[in-house]
Image (cartoon, helix red, strand yellow):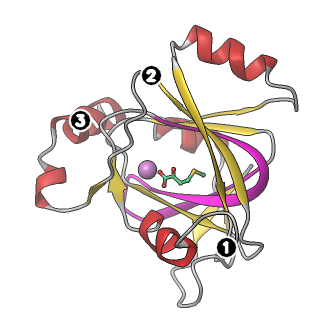
Amino acid sequence: MKAYWFDNLPGDQREPHDSGRPVDPAYLSSLGIVHYELPDDLDAVNKLAAEREYKNRDQIEISPTLLPGYEEKVKNFFHEHLHEDEEIRYILAGGGYFDVRSKDDDWVRIRLEKGDLMIMPPGIYHRFTTDSNNYTKALRLFKDEPKWTPLQRGEETDANQFRKAYLHSRDG
Ligand code: KMT
Ligand code: NI
């Protein structure tokens, strides 16, 4: 895992867009982001899932050949949104980028690779993209039913109770 400020320059979303300014782990945790580097076998993942009561999971393989409608889906993953649940992702192979909004509403880019497990809190604005290798294999974990309805950012999500609760816990 590596986190840095997104450069906001034009160009393909799958390029690194690294401004050269790192973001430290303490700042990520102040945004409510939890990250673990877990070994190759799934034992550690299963243990964490049991502790945090993630009862369901599925696996997604994102690549031009394996995911029908790849280009369109990758564009959709990159639309800024929030969820009313945690978003929990464990990277099994390949890599990708999650961008999350900072306290000042800038983008922090988080590069994830094999073995990275990241938990984003409900209500955080974020987006995802594959990298220029166009390959991400990930485990998606869920507390209950697989439910990952993205709510696109707008006036309605700004007023969403999960958004408000998130800001309250982030900013006190
Ligand atoms: C999301 O919510 O954008 C995704 O689940 C992307 C695929 S998981 C690496
Ligand atoms: Ni999401």
Residue placed most toward the observer, 30 or 56: 56
| Residue 35 percent across, percent down from the top left | 65, 35
Q: Residues within 10 Å of mark 2 (few under 14, many from 20)?
A: some
Q: Residues within 10 Å of mark 3 (few under 14, many from 20)?
A: some
Mark 3 close to ligand 2, CB under 8 Å: no
Q: Are marks 2 and 1 in contact (CB under 8 Å)?
A: no
Q: Quadrant of residue 59?
A: top right
Q: Which residue is mark 2?
A: 143
Q: Which mark lies nearer to you, 3 or 2? A: 2
Horizontal placement of 25 versus 145: left or right?
Answer: right
Q: Which residues lie in the magenta part?
A: 87-113
Give the spatial CA distance, label 2 vs label 1.
29 Å
Prevailing secondary structure of the magenta residues = strand
Q: Which mark is residue 64?
A: 1
Q: Quadrant of the C terminus?
A: top left
Which residue is rendered at x = 67% and y = 45% of the image? 138
Mark positioned earlier in the residue sequence (3 or 1): 1
Q: Disc 1 on helix, strand or loop?
A: loop
Note whether 17 is above or below 121 in the view shown. below
Note whether 81 is above or below 19 in the view shown. above
Q: Which mark is residue 30?
A: none
Which residue is rendered at x = 57% and y = 78% of the image? 13
Residue placed most toward the observer, 155 or 22: 155
Q: Residues within 10 Å of mark 1 (few under 14, many from 20)?
A: few
| Residue 155 percent across, percent down from the top left | 11, 60
Q: Is residue 48 magenta?
A: no
Question: Which amino acid type corresponds to the residue marked 2 in the rendered image?
Answer: Lys
Q: Which residue is mark 3?
A: 162
Horizontal placement of 131 versus 72: left or right?
Answer: right
